């Protein structure tokens, strides 16, 4: 089979919030979609990772979806009902956005490997081979769930799941579920599961609840912390992990129901449950790991310079530029891993990459 070959200036990998923002700004800077730059995505439909979010994640339970540049999210909603699923509303928005902005996304195309040869990047997917002078990588984190290693994990005869696998709490009816993690997803899933099953909540660090709404000041502080890390070449923490947990009415209710009593992390997994360092044990049918995601960057391995500790040294106005390979930008990585951060990162990456490559 001969694969289709495309030659272009810039390839944007991923068409979530970060990739679409980058595409918008490449166009705005005079580059033609499908010719001067190409945007591709492995998912079958528009929506980035939002198309995979669990059904009970609604517009009332998401943090906030920021508008992409040039089109308002709220204007695309068919209803003012906040019970609408994020997995429906956001993909619908991105779909309309692609059409309105005239951004042609090549999909489904999974980039398996990127390599460099003769001053060009080769972006390799099973059905097409692209070559370009620069890359904006916007592949998010959804494809790379993280589960820490604990002794005995392979012995466990129950089911181990990650946040990514969650669809509905109903499947846990009558079971005992150990919910791991202190992030927003852990709390939201614990809330739902504890209404139909018995639960034990375990966290590595004591969860931090914050009073009042999450304001811009706290947001900037959280982003600045993550940005400082990547500018030193350290692995990023998730933005969400440094923002603290909102004391929502659901959380207050969970406190009342007695399900918010965190236990420290267990030290091993047994055949039928988990065991702590003090010797205490608990039986479990399910261990649900809400232990986050890491950036999906495996395909860039041959071209992405890493620091000794494994991190990537980032530079540029919003730390989207790979310092040791400025022809690669990572949008939606580290400090820009939120819808607002991804928006800004897309703009910065587009402008800086055009400048680096000297194209217009
Ligand atoms: P994604 O939306 O993940 O898009 C990446 C795209 O890249 C996908 O379409 C994927 O198919 C594609 N891709 C990946 N690998 C490849 C490959 N090898 N080849 C080709 N294509 C590839 N942020 C907020 O601001 N507000 C919220 O309320 C919020 N809620 C969240 C809830 C959950 C459960 C999670 C996990 C995250 C949440 N976030 C939220 C963070 C959110 O992920 C980001 O805000 C943002 O949507 C990510 O955009 P992105 O474009 O970087 O990534």
Image (cartoon, rainbow, N blue to C red):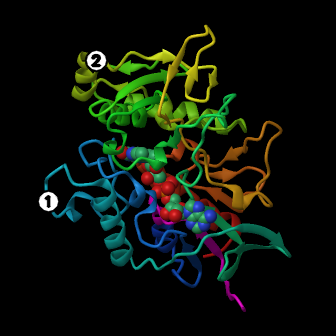
**Side of 58 where 277 appears, left or right:** right
In this view, 112 is above or below 325: below
Of residues 344 and 281, which is closer to you in this image? 281
Q: Residue at x 45, y 61 (%)?
A: 48
In this view, 79 is above or below 220: below
Q: Residue at x 56, y 11 (%)?
A: 280
Of residues 61 and 65, which is closer to you in this image? 61
Q: Position of residue 311 (x, y in %)?
A: 73, 41
The CA span between labels 1 and 2 is 32 Å
Which segment is the magenta one? 1-21
Q: Position of residue 263 (x, y in %)?
A: 48, 15
Callout 2: SS: helix
Callout 1: SS: loop
The label number, if any, that marks residue 133 in the structure image: none
Q: Residue at x 74, y 49 (%)?
A: 323
Q: Is residue 351 visible?
A: no
Q: Residue at x 39, y 61 (%)?
A: 51
User: Label 1: few (<14), some or many (≥20) within 10 Å?
Assistant: few
- Name the image quarter holding the N terminus: bottom right
- Magenta stretch containing residue 77, yes or no? no
In this view, 325 is above or below 255: below
Q: Position of residue 19 (x, y in %)?
A: 51, 63
**Side of 10 where 55 appears, left or right:** left
**Side of 320 where 104 appears, left or right:** left
User: Label 2: few (<14), some or many (≥20) within 10 Å?
Assistant: few
Count of picture labels? 2
Q: Is residue 6 visible?
A: yes
In this figure, which residue is indicated by the disc labeled 2?
255
Residue 73 location, quadrant = bottom left
In this figure, which residue is indicated by the disc labeled 1?
79
């Amino acid at each position: 089979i001969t694969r289709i070959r495309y030659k272009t200036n810039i390839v944007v990998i991923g068409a979530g919030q970060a990739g679409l923002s980058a595409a918008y700004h490449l166009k705005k800077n005079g580059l033609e979609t499908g010719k001067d730059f190409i945007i591709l995505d492995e998912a079958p439909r528009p929506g980035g990772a939002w198309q995979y979010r669990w059904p009970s994640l609604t517009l009332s339970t998401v943090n906030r979806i920021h508008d992409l540049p040039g089109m308002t999210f709220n204007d695309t909603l068919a209803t003012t009902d906040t019970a609408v699923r994020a997995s429906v509303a956001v993909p619908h928005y991105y779909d309309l956005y692609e059409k309105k902005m005239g951004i042609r996304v090549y999909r489904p195309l999974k980039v398996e490997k990127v390599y460099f040869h003769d001053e060009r990047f080769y972006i390799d997917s099973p059905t097409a081979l692209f070559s370009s002078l620069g890359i904006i990588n916007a592949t998010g984190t959804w494809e790379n769930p993280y589960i820490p290693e604990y002794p005995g994990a392979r012995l466990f005869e129950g089911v181990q799941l990650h946040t990514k696998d969650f669809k509905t709490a109903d499947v846990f009816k009558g079971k005992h579920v150990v919910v791991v993690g202190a992030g927003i997803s852990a709390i939201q899933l614990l809330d739902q599961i504890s209404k139909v099953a018995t639960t034990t909540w375990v966290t590595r660090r004591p969860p931090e609840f914050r009073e009042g709404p999450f304001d811009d000041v706290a947001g900037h502080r959280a982003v600045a912390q993550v940005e400082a890390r990547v500018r030193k070449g350290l692995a990023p923490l998730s933005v969400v992990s440094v923002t603290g947990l909102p004391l929502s009415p659901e959380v207050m209710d969970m406190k009342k129901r007695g399900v918010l009593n965190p236990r420290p992390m267990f030290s091993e997994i047994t055949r039928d449950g988990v065991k702590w360092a003090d010797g205490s044990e608990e039986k479990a049918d399910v261990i649900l790991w809400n232990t986050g995601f890491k950036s999906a960057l495996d395909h860039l391995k041959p071209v992405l310079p890493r620091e000794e500790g494994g991190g990537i040294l980032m530079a540029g106005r919003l730390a989207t530029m790979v310092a040791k390979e400025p022809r690669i930008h990572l949008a939606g990585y580290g400090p820009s891993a939120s819808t607002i951060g991804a928006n800004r990162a897309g703009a910065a990456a587009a402008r800086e990459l055009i400048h680096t490559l000297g194209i217009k």
